[in-house]
Image (cartoon, rainbow, N blue to C red):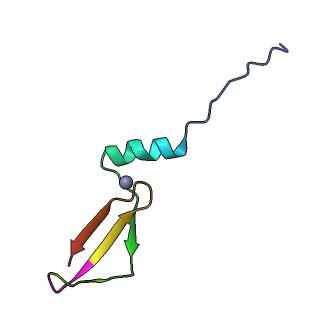
């Protein structure tokens, strides 16, 4: 006893982790409320933006 095993835990970059998730298709979608209307199609749509990689997605209702 007395031996303390110390784990050297290099912090895995959260950002890198996020990018990996994004690459796998798991984006962190956030609703963009600035422009709820898609003018082009004239339909009410929901805009999403990934807070990690900045990808955008539009979902029509
Ligand atoms: Zn993303």
Task: State the residue at coordinates (83%, 13%).
Answer: 1
Q: Where, quadrant-wise, is the C terminus in this rendering?
A: bottom left
Rendering coords of residue 2 (x, y %): 85, 15
Give left or right: position of 30 versus 24: right
Give left or right: position of 4 versus 11: right
Q: Which residues are magenta?
A: 41-45
Task: State the residue at coordinates (73%, 22%).
Answer: 6
Q: Is residue 5 magenta?
A: no
- Depicted 8 relative to depicted 42: above or below: above
Which quadrant of the render holds ligand 1?
A: bottom left
The image quadrant of residue 50 is: bottom left
Rendering coords of residue 23 (x, y %): 33, 44
Rendering coords of residue 12 (x, y %): 56, 36
Rendering coords of residue 47 (x, y %): 31, 73
The image quadrant of residue 31 is: bottom left
Seen as rendered, the residue at the extreme front is 40
In terms of secondary structure, what is the magenta stretch mainly?
strand
């Amino acid at each position: 006893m007395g031996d303390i095993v110390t784990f050297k835990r290099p912090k895995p970059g959260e950002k890198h982790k996020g990018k990996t998730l994004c690459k796998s298709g798991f984006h962190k979608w956030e609703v963009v409320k600035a422009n709820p209307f898609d003018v082009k199609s004239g339909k009410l749509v929901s805009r999403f933006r990934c807070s990690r990689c900045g990808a955008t997605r539009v979902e029509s209702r």
